[in-house]
Amino acid sequence: MKAIRVRQFGDPEVMVLEDVPDLTPGAGQVLVRIHAAGVNPVETYIRSGNYPLKPALPYTPGTDGAGVVEAVGAGVTSVLPGTRVYVGHTSGGTTGTYAGQAAIGATGVHPLPDRVSFAQGAALGVPYITAWRALFERAGAKAGETVLVHGASGGVGVAAVQIARAAGLTVIGTAGTDRGRALVLEQGAHHALDHGNAAYRDEVKRLTNGRGPDVIIEMLANVNLNHDLSTVAQRGRIVIVGSRGDVQISPRLIMAQNVIITGLTLWTATDEELRRAYAGVTEGLANGTLTPVIGAELPLADAPKAHKQVLESGAHGKIVLIP
């Protein structure tokens, strides 16, 4: 089969398409023929070597994907060969989804409804599980509250908008382009604002009758966090999902607003936290409230290009690789 291999940490070009042997599932694993693999910013950080989690070299990147079960290992009874599935992070491990096949721990394999394409299935794992956990486990979001989703036109942002709207929250999303803001509204946000215009913070206050949002999902904390502290409601919660640098904040704003600032990474989630999140996302797929948006489909050989695009501003849906 074909697979992307990384033999040294560095720039995107260290990812090379190679011929590698076909896989055999081990005990507790499911062998999936990958039809699409999701590309996430965290994979670019890992590939560069600038991330606490460093896999042993050489390795194949990717935790998200979708395809068809080819075989199951010893002890697996939860899924049958021929089943359409999406896959994501699991404590059972994965061989990497930037490839024609992946051997996935059985708890990381989930049913993919016929209405959802393989490309859309590949957009589920990291973005939707991150958004679900940010909203419900870290922020404790409740129906009737208001959430501000920064960067709402990207993979995690779209997921957060859809999940929050389905749960009965009032959703305000931000995006940097007219196209992005149109997408945010299409995905269920009640309001879409331009985060490139500082006046958006005044508009958030106006839309919430001066109170501010109860929850802020923050994708770029190094730029926005200090502003979030003067925007969020009293006793609000700010969940940091992403940051690309340091930030200086005023502790007095935290005190004055009685605000909770928290963060999450998917890699530290417990098995039980993952189980709950996947249950919620899988049900959303089944009942039609969750539908991933694909911004670009690229051939597997274009993984270096995908790693550059996923970090560019003006996100519009999810980038996926097609083996």
Image: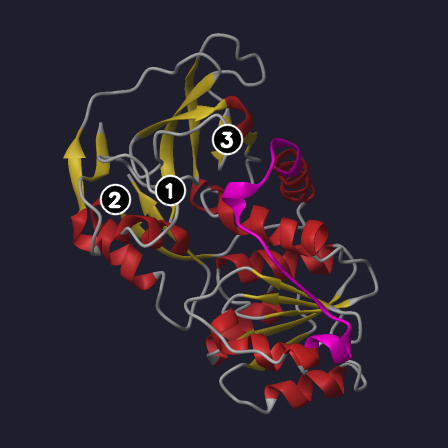
**Relative depth, front residue between 62 and 268:** 268
> Cβ–Cβ below 8 Å for labels 1 and 2?
yes
Q: Residues within 10 Å of mark 3 (few under 14, many from 20)?
A: many
Disc 2: which residue: 300
On the image, the x and y values in percent for residue 56 come to: 28, 34
Label drawn at residue 225: none
Element type where label 1 sits in the image: strand
Q: Is 32 above or below relative to 128? A: above
Task: Report the amino acid beneath label 3.
Answer: Val
Where is the C terminus found, in terms of image quarters?
top left
Residues in magenta? Answer: 254-273
Disc 1: which residue: 37
- Relative placement, left or right, of 291 versus 313 is right
Element type where label 2 sits in the image: helix
Residue in view at x 43 percent, y 45 percent: 119
Q: CA–CA distance between discs 1 and 2?
A: 9 Å
Q: CA–CA distance between discs 2 and 3?
A: 19 Å
Q: Quadrant of residue 300?
A: top left
On the image, the x and y values in percent for residue 292 come to: 53, 52
Task: Report the amino acid beneath label 1.
Answer: Ala
Q: Is residue 40 visible?
A: no
2 or 3: tag closer to the N-terminus? 3
Where is the N terminus found, in terms of image quarters?
top left
Disc 3: which residue: 85
Q: Quadrant of residue 163?
A: bottom right
Residue in view at x 21 percent, y 32 percent: 2
3 or 1: tag closer to the N-terminus? 1
